[in-house]
Image: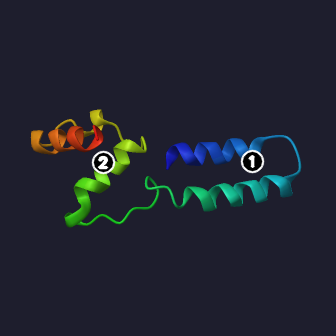
Amino acid sequence: MERLTKEYIELLSLPGNASDHFWELEKRIRKDKKHPGVLIEMRRSTAIWDIAILVRDKVITMDDLEGYSEDLIDAMKLILSR
């Protein structure tokens, strides 16, 4: 979210027409709301798949999983290798 906020600020800071910036920002937010890094419903039954999606979409990295169980890390490696 922090990265997106900075990108929105940069978009609004560009020279040009304020209304063009507004509509571009509105379009960008609508697209970003659907990104799994912004909105995801976590359930225990699908958590492993949700984590794999987050890694695949580069929302998190395998390094972010450091400290979690070896079983989880091995499962991520297996899922992502397919």
User: Are the residues tagged 2 and 1 within 8 Å (C-beta)?
Assistant: no
Q: Which badge, 2 or 1, comes first in the chain's sequence?
A: 1
Nearest to viewer (mark 2 / mark 1): 2
**Residue closest to the eye, 58 or 12:** 58
The color scheme shown is: rainbow
Tag 1 secondary structure: helix
Give the residue at the far right of this rendering.
17
Judged left or right of residue 22, residue 8 is left
Q: How much space separates mark 2 and mark 1, taking CA atoms?
A: 33 Å
User: In the picture, which quadrant includes the C terminus?
Assistant: top left
Report the residue marked by disc 2. Answer: 52
The amino acid marked with disc number 1 is Leu
* Residue drawn at 25 percent across, 62 percent down: 46
Picture layout, residue 44 above or below residue 75: below
55 with respect to 76 (left or right):
right
Q: Which mark is residue 57?
A: none
- Hey, which quadrant is residue 15 in on the image? top right
Crowd band around label 2 with a 10 angstrom C-alpha radius: few (<14), some (14–19), many (20+): many
Give residue 12's mark.
1
Label 1 crowd (10 A; few <14 / some 14-19 / many >=20):
some
Number of marks in picture: 2
Q: Which is more toward the observer, 47 or 16?
A: 47
The structure residue drawn at horizontal position 22% and vertical position 37%, both measured from the top left corner, is 77
Counting from the top left corner in percent of width and height, residue 24 is at: 75, 54
Element marked by disc 2 = helix
**Residue drawn where x is 15% and y is 39% of the image:** 74
Report the side of 20 relative to 80 (left or right). right
